[in-house]
Amino acid sequence: MVEPRGLDPAVIDLHAVRADTPGNHRGVFLDSAGSSLPPVQVLDEVVAHLRREAEVGGYRAATERADDLAAGYEDFARLLGCEADEVAFTDSATRSWLVAFDAIPLAPGDRILCTEAEYGGNAVPLLRRAAEVGAEVAPIPSDATGAVDVQALRTMLDERVRLVSLVHVPTNGGLVNPAAAVIEAAHEAGALVLLDACQSAGQVDLSDLDADIVTGTGRKWLRGPRGTGFLVVRGRIRDRLQPRQVDLHSGTWDAPDRFSLRPDARVFELWESSVADRLGLIAAARYALALGVPNIEAAVRSRAEHLRSGLANLPGVTIHDLGEVRCGLVTFTVDGVPPTEVRDRLADQNITVTVSGTTSTQYDMTRRGLDLIVRASPHYFTSPAQLDKAIASVRELTRHP
Ligand SMILES: *Cc1c(COP(=O)(O)O)cnc(C)c1O
């Protein structure tokens, strides 16, 4: 397999990252697309801060870590290729997406284009708000490989298009959409691009992408705590947005009848948050930066390709990943064995996979006539031997369905 940018997946020291990941010794963990195993560096940060809060109270404990909390914006700016004042922290990718989307003014007759890989959590608010304001949502067709068709997008872009909602990597497969080309086409037509990087952040290098808005989560490929998310809003589009949900952190109550809003992306944050989880999220970003995201990308692709080709060679197993450029999500079905049963029988052997269904990705699943598929997502800490064990276990299922 050709590695992206000539990188060697072996640059990541498998022994070291496995030693940092206690959960990895319990079995074969293949659900980093769902909720990954955090390294001890993340776990220790969260637990230590909770203990400190119990000793001195949450306010003093946060003040003690003020420098680290401030540096977190710089870390995410490095990870995502933006400025620190373009970063906000939230409690999920969906929260990030919602606060940014709700801030985009929409009028009757406006159009929003999305990818066929659109995520259910984005589609529900998209369709609801479009119905409320009299705007229209249209999925951009996919090309023969299953990736978003940039030529088709160009023919759909006109002055009515306010926003392109771009899912970088879908929740239901290894496809990596051609984000740079989509962003370029949308910008030429004056449309904003909202990049859902929930499945790419932490496994695909995003630092060269120039989307106007980027949303992502902590718990998936970044290996952070649950209940954490991040948002990038570029400074250049800030005056095109109208933040809806603002508080005394997003703004200042300057006089009894006057307030002002923050000029940076933190206008999208609320004052209260879980500081322990925030510190854990920052530790997760630092861990990824220390390994090097391009190295992570090469290692994850190599693991996923190992698993994908091993499964593809089994009679009775069908791989469902689309696209030519693929990443760490591997989706498949086993003839005669329902996906939930595949998941449960693998779980009996301490192999963790999950399933992905129609309501998460309606456009795509309906178009392909799929209703449920098994999703296995190895990270760089999964060893080739663990992948072989998973492949052997799926082989058993095909023999004894
Ligand atoms: C998981 C996922 C989300 C939602 O992330 P949350 O942190 O659960 O809000 C959004 N988009 C995609 C593509 C996802 O896979």
Image (spheres, rainbow, N blue to C red):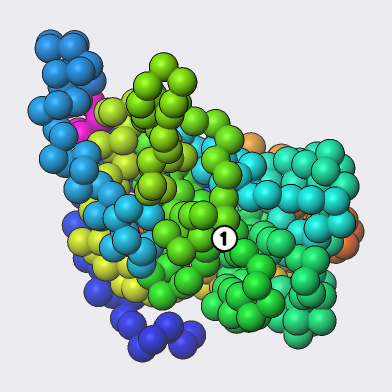
Residue 169 screen position, x and y as percent:
59, 63
Which residue is located at x 67 percent, y 56 percent? 172
For the residue with label 1, is its CB less than 8 Å from the closest atom of ligand 1? Answer: no
Give the prevailing secondary structure in the magenta stretch.
helix
Which residue is located at x 29 percent, y 55 percent? 84
Q: Which residues are magenta?
A: 44-48
Label 1 sits on a secondary structure element that is strand
Tell me the residue that label 1 is attached to. 195
Graded by Cα atoms within 10 Å as few (under 14), some (14 to 19) or many (20 or more), the crowding at tag 1 reads many
Instruction: Classify residue 311 by image quadrant.
Output: bottom right
User: In the rendered image of this protein, does residue 163 appear above or below residue 249?
Assistant: below
User: In the rendered image of this protein, does residue 380 appear above or below residue 252?
Assistant: below
How many marks are shown on the rendered structure? 1
Residue 253 screen position, x and y as percent:
38, 24
Q: Is residue 212 magenta?
A: no
| Residue closer to the observer: 209 or 171 | 209
Q: Is residue 47 magenta?
A: yes
Instruction: Classify residue 136 by image quadrant.
Output: bottom right
Q: Is residue 92 left or right of residue 84?
A: right
Instruction: Classify residue 258 by image quadrant.
Output: top left
Q: Is residue 5 left or right of residue 54?
A: right
Residue 319 screen position, x and y as percent:
70, 66
Which residue is located at x 37 percent, y 48 percent? 264
- Three-letter amino acid code at disc 1? Leu
